[in-house]
Image (spheres, rainbow, N blue to C red):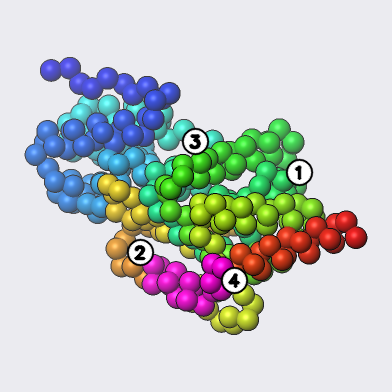
Amino acid sequence: MPGPKDLDPSSSPRALLGAELRHAREKAGLSQEELGQRLFVSGSFIGQLEAGTRRMQPEMARMVDEVLGTGDFFTRNCTAAARSKYPEHFAEAAEAEAQAMAIRQYAPLLIPGLLQTPAYARAVCRAYQPTAPESEIDKLVTARIERAQVLDHPTDPLLWSVVDEAALRRVTGGPEVMAEALRHIAVLARRRRAIVQVLPFGAGAHAAMEGSIKLMDFEDAPPLVYFEGVGTGRLEDDPAIVKHQRFTYELLTACALSPEKSLALIETMAQDYAHEDHP
């Protein structure tokens, strides 16, 4: 019997690769847990590969071919599935984000990417790469703004962001850019397209002082948590770690202002920035 055809990179290669993995696993009579044991990963990781929420790395593809007897099919096609317009450390998280049914995020230092305006995103990307050519910055900004297209749907995904007051007070791109950025957040909140809470300075010490958190839930795959640093990022699916980070996020929402008070603060700050720019 001929093997599966090569994947078409133009038509969701990661989803197709996941479907082929599920087909090959079931043909071999293995559960996700059983295949995971043979590949030295968790069954939930296999589920995420099959759902297309995780990237299959070349070494993993080689092992899959060996265990499932698929020749070099996954080795040959994982390269197409790995192509991304995002930075390497963030690519897997961005593609998982696009498939999530719920995203909960704490942002300590900047406005979350899904809530950014083009001008704010440009200021951030330029700060990251001060010597990059304008064409490179254009690509980064375009990719970041395209991510927000998931919010074009009237209800999915649920986006719940806790934004530290420090991120709103840091003047990124100038007062005019900040005024526009905060008005944009307010519009999304008033459209009921995002739940936004501000964690005020007055909250004092809190459970996530060491960094950001992004929790993602999926309809047909286990949840993930994404940790990000300067030029680095890591997706984690360990149930104990995800559970702990979910509890941390719940503590943050308890310390933050209510959505109504947060919206009022955001709109007031937007007016202040606008007046600062136009005295």
Label 3 Cα neighbours within 10 Å, binned few <14 / some 14-19 / many ≥20? some
Residue 110 placement, left or right of 245? right
Q: Nearer the viewer, mark 3 or mark 1?
A: 3
Q: Give the residue at mark 4.
A: 261
Label 1 Cα neighbours within 10 Å, binned few <14 / some 14-19 / many ≥20? few
146 relative to 222, above or below:
above
Q: Position of residue 178 (x, y in %)?
A: 73, 56
Residue displayed at 68% across by 57% down: 182
Q: Position of residue 255 (x, y in %)?
A: 51, 77
Query: Cα distance, mark 2 to mark 1?
Result: 37 Å
Frontmost residue, 226 versus 174:
174
Query: Is residue 233 visible to the viewer in this orientation of the structure?
Result: no
Q: Quadrant of the C terminus?
A: bottom right
Q: Give the residue at mark 1.
A: 131
Q: Position of residue 141 (x, y in %)?
A: 64, 41
CB under 8 Å between callouts 2 and 1? no
54 relative to 79, above or below:
below
Residue displayed at 56% across by 38% down: 146
Q: Which amino acid, by three-letter code, is at mark 1?
A: Thr
Q: Nearer the viewer, mark 3 or mark 2?
A: 2
Q: Give the residue at mark 2.
A: 242
Q: Position of residue 183 (x, y in %)?
A: 68, 54
Range shown magenta = 245-260
CB under 8 Å between callouts 1 and 4? no
